[in-house]
């Protein structure tokens, strides 16, 4: 740290950039994440002219570039300071990113069952997301699930079961239809940062929430489309590798939304409870639209039957080009459901 005491504090394995304004001595450290972990020993003391100095830290993000900065500053001490102002003070510890709360610490262990190894930074992002969801849900009806334990399981972990449903490269183009509060789309993107994600949400208030939470979490590369899937499906045909939908409609309806977006060979993943009574309609939709149901995976098959009971993922592969009449307008789809 370029201070009057000429003390250097190593805060990151990268070069520090001194920016000395008139009243402060500072170090700015670039970081890959908004959540920067910096700790000083409780016994660490910086002395300037016989005075123990108190340090403080600010973490900020450049909205334009998406870069994170950790700023550590020490007040500049003048030699003429009165003796009373130079009394020794106990050195403080700069607060680090807090350890995950119990629900999210458990989430990290449970995620290994679907092949995910989450970093502390990713868990911090999930927890901050959950806090924002709970707060905003008081003014916008985003979800009926508001307990942190349930959010960890019924939103995040349930979304991540998609990683056990197919082989992922981590670089897929994914479209999530009916994103609502951002599940599964944003949860998938947090777990696999290289996914190229498009969120489709027709309700304006929910779409604005998605935009706000993406900005809050630094997910500047996530596209949010406030449109109906029936309309966007004609504009974005054959562009995506994976389509996802959770709690959107019947299985046949959802496949009509998703399959037009997918390239041939791409896969749709649909979250359902009981699926037996919807399979006949789904097979009709697949025959007309160009898909094939390749597997139905129960959460019990993944070792998650007790945490996520009665849940299934239906995986449908697109086998041929979708006829141009699909997806149908909403009124026609209601008149002639699958």
Image: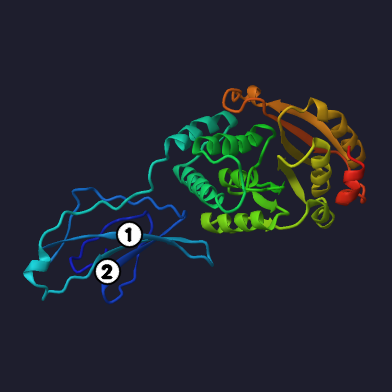
The residue carrying pointer 1 sits among few (fewer than 14), some (14 to 19) or many (20 or more) residues within 10 Å by Cα, namely some
Q: Nearer the viewer, residue 55 or 273?
A: 273
Q: Is residue 287 above or below residue 72?
A: above
- Label 1: state its secondary structure: strand
Q: What residue appears at the point 79 percent right and 45 percent down from the top-left corner? A: 258
In the rendered picture of this protein, how many numbered marks are placed on residues? 2
Q: What residue appears at the point 42 percent right and 40 percent down from the top-left corner? A: 100
Q: Nearer the viewer, residue 188 or 177?
A: 177
Residue 184 position within the rendered picture, expressed as x and y whole percent measured from the top left: 64, 42
Instruction: Tell me if I can see residue 183 in this picture.
Output: yes
Quadrant in the rendering for residue 305: top right
Q: Nearer the viewer, residue 154 or 203?
A: 203
Q: Is residue 143 left or right of residue 94?
A: right
Provide the residue designation for mark 1. 57
Mark 1 touching mark 2, by CB under 8 A?
Answer: no
Provide the residue designation for mark 2. 25
The residue carrying pointer 2 sits among few (fewer than 14), some (14 to 19) or many (20 or more) residues within 10 Å by Cα, namely some
- Label 2: state its secondary structure: strand
């Amino acid at each position: 740290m370029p201070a009057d005491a000429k003390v250097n504090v190593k805060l990151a394995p990268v070069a520090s950039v001194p920016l000395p304004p008139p009243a402060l001595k500072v170090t700015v450290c670039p970081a890959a994440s908004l959540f920067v972990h910096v700790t000083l020993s409780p016994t660490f003391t910086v002395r300037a002219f016989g005075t123990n100095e108190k340090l403080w830290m600010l973490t900020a993000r450049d909205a334009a570039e998406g870069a994170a900065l950790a700023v550590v500053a020490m007040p500049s001490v003048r030699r003429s300071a009165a003796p009373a102002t130079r009394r020794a003070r106990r050195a403080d510890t700069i607060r680090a990113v807090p350890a995950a709360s119990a629900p999210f610490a458990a989430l990290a262990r449970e995620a290994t069952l679907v092949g995910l190894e989450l970093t502390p930074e990713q868990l911090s992002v999930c927890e901050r997301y959950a806090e924002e969801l709970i707060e905003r849900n008081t003014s916008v009806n985003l979800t009926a699930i508001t307990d942190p334990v349930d959010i960890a399981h019924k939103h995040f972990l349930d979304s991540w079961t998609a990683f056990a449903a197919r082989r992922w490269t981590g670089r897929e183009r994914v479209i999530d239809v009916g994103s609502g509060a951002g599940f599964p789309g944003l949860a998938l993107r947090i777990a696999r940062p290289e996914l190229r994600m498009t969120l489709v949400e027709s309700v304006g208030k929910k779409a604005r929430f998605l935009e706000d939470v993406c900005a809050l979490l630094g997910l500047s590369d996530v596209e949010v489309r406030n449109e109906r899937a029936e309309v966007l499906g004609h504009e974005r045909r054959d562009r995506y590798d994976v389509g996802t939908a959770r709690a959107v409609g019947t299985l046949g309806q959802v496949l009509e939304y998703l399959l037009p977006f997918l390239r041939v060979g791409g896969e749709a993943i649909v979250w359902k409870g009981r699926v037996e009574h919807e399979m006949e309609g789904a097979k009709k939709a697949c025959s007309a639209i160009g898909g094939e149901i390749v597997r139905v995976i129960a959460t019990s098959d993944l070792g998650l039957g007790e945490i996520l009971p009665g849940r299934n993922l239906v995986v449908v592969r697109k086998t041929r080009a979708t006829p141009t009449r699909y997806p149908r307008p909403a009124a026609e789809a209601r008149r002639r459901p699958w």
